[in-house]
């Protein structure tokens, strides 16, 4: 049985002050129907990743309590963790002043036992978050520890 | 005397592994020449704001140690704090696995004495960061404290 169509979001108000200080959640999607999402660990504050949502994935995130993104490369709804087991449970969802970005504050779900060995991580490269390299001079330096082997989790894809 | 043209960034490598685990900083700008930037307070971990950079603003950020964005609405290089006094000093600049996002970890410069009253903030609405509202049910709730009066800082614009 197909799911009922998700509730849409209301139109943004015309007045800037209402958009910035109001209590209506009126997310503003770009021309491609997307809104950027910054995902942060709710306990440590680490910025884990950045991805896009469309209205369907934002609605699924709110309704299920687990972060869903829109995969631009695969053009599909993407429940984070559906392949890796490392799902993101929403602790708090925020939006910014002009409501064209969302911030998902999350905890990372337990990974599959034979995959990441119970390690809570978010980045497919094997680090807890995607921002594991810092700019130094004209180059990059890895400043975080790798915590799982992607070949074991994703089967070497 | 006009400044010399900024050094450009090298082309991204063709190989995914080099992009993800290499030590060359090869930021990937989108079709419009922009790269998203997440800005986080280096001490508290608070996500302060989200904006875009182009190659010129990313280069200016690296070379000056102060965050520069590209203002899409004004189509100009934007040194954060140039109006408000609330500049962002770079503590660390990171990039993500596929180098199409940057994370600026910053401290906020002292505000002008007669403006924000010395309050360190980043959002033009008067909050420390832009993500001052959380989604609750179908609405939004303000979950942070306003710390300055925008009319005093920006002259009621």
Image (cartoon, coloured by chain):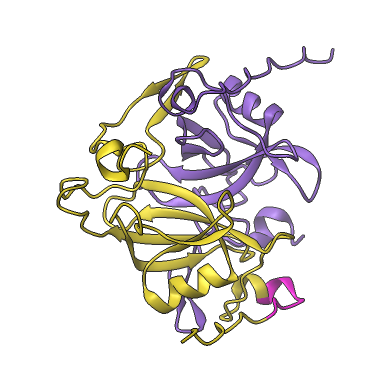
Chain colours: A purple, B yellow
Farthest residue in the right direction?
A1
Q: Is residue A145 visible?
A: no
Residue A64 or residue B65, whichever sits in front: B65
Q: Nearer the viewer, residue B133 or A142?
A: B133
User: Going 25% across and 31% down the picture, which residue do you hit?
Assistant: B145
Whether the magenta-drawn stretch holds residue B17 is answered as: yes
The answer to whether residue B8 is magenta is no
Corner quadrant of residue A26: top right
Left/right placement of residue A24 relative to residue B33 reads left
Image point (29%, 55%), residue name: B86
Q: Position of residue A136 (x, y in %)?
A: 44, 80
Q: How many numbered markers are drawn?
A: 0
Q: What residue sits 50% from the left and 34% below the top?
A: A98
The image shows residue B90 at horizontal and vertical percentages of 35, 67
Q: Nearer the viewer, residue B114 or A157?
A: B114
Q: Is residue A42 above or below residue B107?
A: above
Q: Quadrant of the C terminus of chain B?
A: top left
Q: Quadrant of residue A29?
A: top right
Q: Main secondary structure of the magenta part?
A: loop
Residue range in magenta is: B11-18
Residue at coordinates 28% horizontally, 59% vertically from top-left?
Answer: B107
Q: Up-down: is A137 above or below A101?
A: below
């Amino acid at each position: 049985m197909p799911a009922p169509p998700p509730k849409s979001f209301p139109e943004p108000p015309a007045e800037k002050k209402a958009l910035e200080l109001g209590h209506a959640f009126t997310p503003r999607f770009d021309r491609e129907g997307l809104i950027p999402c910054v995902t942060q660990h709710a306990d440590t504050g680490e910025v884990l990743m950045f991805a896009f949502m469309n209205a369907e994935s934002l609605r699924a995130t709110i309704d299920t309590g687990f972060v869903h993104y829109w995969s631009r490369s695969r053009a599909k709804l993407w429940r984070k963790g559906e392949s890796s087991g490392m799902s993101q449970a929403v602790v708090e969802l925020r939006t910014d002043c002009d409501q064209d970005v969302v911030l998902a504050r999350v905890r990372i779900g337990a990974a599959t036992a034979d995959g990441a060995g119970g390690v809570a991580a978010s980045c497919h490269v094997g680090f807890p978050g995607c921002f594991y390299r810092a700019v130094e001079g004209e180059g990059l330096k890895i400043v975080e520890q790798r915590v799982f082997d992607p070949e074991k989790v994703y089967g070497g894809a």
